[in-house]
Amino acid sequence: MTDTTPAVTYASYLRVDELLSLQQPRSAGPEHDEMLFIVIHQVYELWFKELLHELDRVARLLTDDDTHRAQHTLKRILTILKVMVAQLDILETMTPLEFLSFRERLEAASGFQSDQFRQIEFVLGRKSEAAMLRFPGGSRGRAALERRFREPTLWDAFLHYLAREGYPVPGDQLSRDVTAPVRASEPVQRILIDVYRTDAKNSELCERLVDLDEGIQEWRYRHVKMVERTIGAKSGTGGSMGAAYLRTTLGQSLFPDLWEIRTRL
């Protein structure tokens, strides 16, 4: 019997025709720079998807006590974050007037509506019920955020990993409310100081988590500066506060204990 299944090609495997049909400018003409704006943000959503894929893997590897591969995956995540920051250089080639030529076509659309970025924040411990409730009930984004809201964070996976490594992680940290923000803990800090002084393998893992925290903060900072460069102090699309809100997210550590111990080592 002859196999009539079409051979897999580059275009069919990557669904290139469908992919290239997804850029649909709304401006008349259309305005030249709207294509760049669409492509950059679609690419960001793809990177967000990959980051979630990799962050979930790190949590599973920590649960499996596979430190080596967890560090390898964290290195990949850090490299992706550097690419995401570099993409802002491309977006900044668009002048304020070029953005204004099509901005009104965005109507209520705003980056605040990226459920995948909110999912990344949830995985990393920055959970917000208010942010979750902004997404319509029954939508894909709302369902994903509700699941992430209830799941342990990456920090929780790390604490449980340390406990299995023999460190005396307090029970209240291992059974904490995973929907609550990650708070600094003096007992955890004492453990981390011990890790840094006596445990090369796990101190290296701690440093990769610090790199991750710093990488997210770098992306936030560059995002703020890009917004300020493009629209100044204007409100963002969709009624958001624009750069004023984004500035409030700067300097907020994801893993405060790993920063607090720096002055005590």
Image: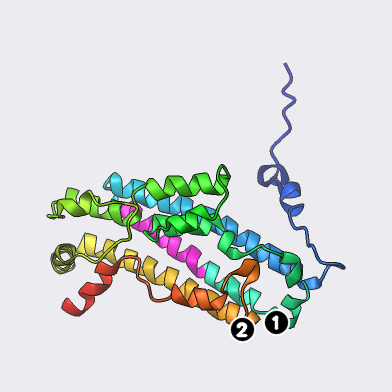
Q: Seen in the image, is 164 located left or right of residue 111?
A: left
Q: Is residue 95 visible?
A: no
Label 2 sits on a secondary structure element that is: loop
- As drawn, 220 above or below 157: below
Q: Is residue 244 visible?
A: yes
Residue drawn 74% across the image and 82% down it: 97
**Residue 75 place in picture, x, y as percent:** 40, 62
State the quadrant of the C terminus: bottom left
- How far separated are the C-alphas under marks 1 and 2? 9 Å
Residue drawn 75% across the image and 58% down it: 23
- As drawn, 160 above or below 185: above
What's under tag 1, amino acid-wise? Pro
What's under tag 2, amino acid-wise? Gly
Cβ–Cβ under 8 Å for marks 1 and 2: yes
**Residue 191 place in picture, x, y as percent:** 15, 63
Instruction: Give the mark nearer the N terminus: 1 vs 2.
Output: 1
Residue drawn 27% across the image and 64% down it: 183
Q: Nearer the viewer, residue 153 or 21?
A: 153
Q: Toward which corner of the image does residue 74 lie, by quadrant?
A: bottom left
Q: Which mark is residue 96?
A: 1
Q: Toward which corner of the image does residue 73 lie, by quadrant?
A: bottom left
Mark 2, residue position: 232
State the quadrant of the N terminus: top right
**Badge 2: residue crowd in 10 Å (few <14, some 14–19, many ≥20):** some
